Image (tube, rainbow, N blue to C red):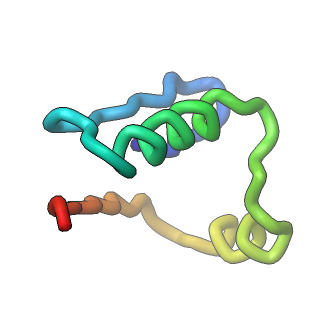
């Protein structure tokens, strides 16, 4: 999932077939990305606002 500045389209990329708990996480992520207001705590939003460059976060999971 990608977080972009306000006014830009939010893109979600998921590779593979969601299986087991992954399906719930994917649905939760899509719901979260579709909200107008963030559910992050104010402290988290403040820390993110202090970032001075663009970051890319890649998350890899494997079945257990």
Where's the N terminus, which quadrant? top left
Name the residue rendered at 29%, 34% in the picture: 13
Name the residue at 38% across, 51% down. 21
Q: Quadrant of the C terminus?
A: bottom left
- State the residue in front, 40 or 47: 40
Image vertical order of residue 30 relative to residue 38, above or below: above
Left or right: where does residue 64 sit relative to residue 59?
A: left
Whether residue 27 is visible to the viewer of this picture, yes or no, is: yes
Which residue: 72% across, 32% down? 35
Relative to the observer, which residue lies in front, 54 or 42?
42
Residue 51 picture quarter: bottom right
Quadrant of the image occupied by residue 58: bottom left
Left or right placement of residue 15 versus residue 47 in this view: left
Locate residue 37 relative to residue 4 in the image: left or right.
right
Q: Is residue 53 left or right of residue 20?
A: right
Q: Quadrant of residue 5?
A: top right
Question: Is residue 2 something that shows in the picture?
Answer: no
**Where residue 24 appears, x then y in whole percent?**
47, 42
Exactly how many numbered labels are in the figure?
Answer: 0
The residue under the point 53% across, 70% down is: 52
Q: Is residue 24 above or below residue 53?
A: above
- Residue 61 placement (x, y as % from top left): 22, 61
Which x, y percent locates residue 63?
17, 60
In the rendered image, residue 33, in percent from the top left (x then y), is placed at 58, 36
- In the rendered view, tell whether residue 32 sits above or below residue 60: above
For this rendering, which residue is in front, 59 or 55?
A: 59
Q: Is residue 58 above or below residue 6?
A: below
């Amino acid at each position: 999932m990608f977080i972009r500045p306000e006014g830009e389209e939010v893109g979600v990329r998921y590779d593979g077939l969601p299986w087991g708990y992954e399906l719930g996480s994917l649905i939760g992520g899509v719901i979260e990305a579709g909200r107008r207001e963030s559910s992050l705590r104010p402290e988290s939003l403040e820390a993110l606002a202090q970032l001075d460059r663009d970051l890319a976060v890649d998350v890899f999971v494997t079945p257990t």
